[in-house]
Amino acid sequence: MFEYAHLAGEPLFYLFIALSFLLGAGYFWGKRINDRIFRSAFSDLVAVVKPVDQTFTNIGGLIGYHATLRPPKSAPVERVDATITFLPRHAWLWMPVSKLIRKYDRLFITIHLRRAPIAEGHLIEKGYARFRGPKITNVDRLQSEAVRWGNLDFILYFGNETIRQRLRNFVNKQPDPGLVRHIALVPEQQRSFIFMIPKTGTVAAALAPIYRWIPTILK
């Protein structure tokens, strides 16, 4: 006889079964969505960068992935690193807390350049800057001003008038930032950094104009 048969008559028993079923279904639902976003984002990255070599690595179970893309040697970009991290959609008990703390999925792109940008510059969305945004190391050496980009307020940090004008011209040519929240140009590291909120089918459209523009502001 089933050792715990007496529990079958308890309402909490059926509640436990229902909750277990719900959490199990939620796991596969969340896993499927995160996997879909990952495949879409990294396919878009490959389409924009057109690498001759690429590697993809899982960095945290269902939470994140890393990609290293190497463009042709003739390209002004030496390497592109990308890290995508997800909200834990597969863990429904943790999801509300994570949504409150982290707010959204995140795609961090680091572009390693063969030549340095002409000066340091940043375009960072005000909301992102306030909420766990990156710390700008040389902020005390930069000037800043407010910029309206699409429906969002950004802060433009610039090291000289030339990079200020180049960044403003870029904003004027792109009427909407899409899901981009930060563009950074750091000559000292010979890198550019981009942060965006990845959504299915959106990464290529947001990244391509930036990726084409960056080589035009190198020394």
Image (spheres, rainbow, N blue to C red):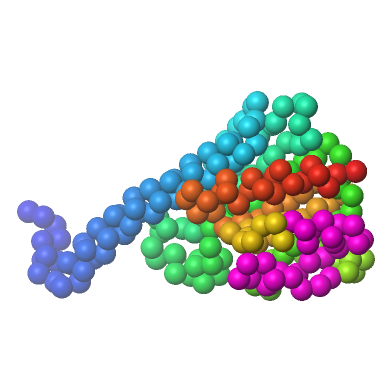
The image quadrant of residue 127 is bottom right
Q: Give the side of residue 148 with respect to residue 21, left or right.
A: right
* Image-based side of 208 in relation to 190, left or right: left
Task: Tell which of 21 and 54 is nearer to you.
Answer: 54
Where is residue 170 shown, x and y percent of the image? 74, 56
Q: Which residue lies furthest to the left in this view?
A: 1
Q: Is residue 28 left or right of residue 113?
A: left
The reply to whether the magenta stretch includes residue 156 is yes
What x and y, as percent, mark residue 37? 47, 49
What residue is shown at x 62% (from left), y 39% (from top)?
A: 48
- In the image, is 216 to the left or to the right of 87? right
Asked if residue 60 can be seen in this view, the reply is: no
Residue 81: which quarter of the image? top right
Identify which residue is drawn at 70% across, 57% down. Answer: 173
Instruction: Decide which of 140, 60 is in the foreground and name it.
Output: 140
Name which residue lies at 49% across and 59% down. Answer: 87
Q: Measuring from the top left, give residue 7's x and y in whole percent.
A: 14, 66
Q: In the rendered view of the protein, which quadrant contains the C terminus?
A: top right
The quarter of the displayed image where residue 158 is located: bottom right
Write the start and end of the magenta stretch as one range: 144-170
Above or below residue 200? Residue 12 is: below
Above or below, 144 relative to 168: below
Up/down of 81 relative to 170, above or below? above
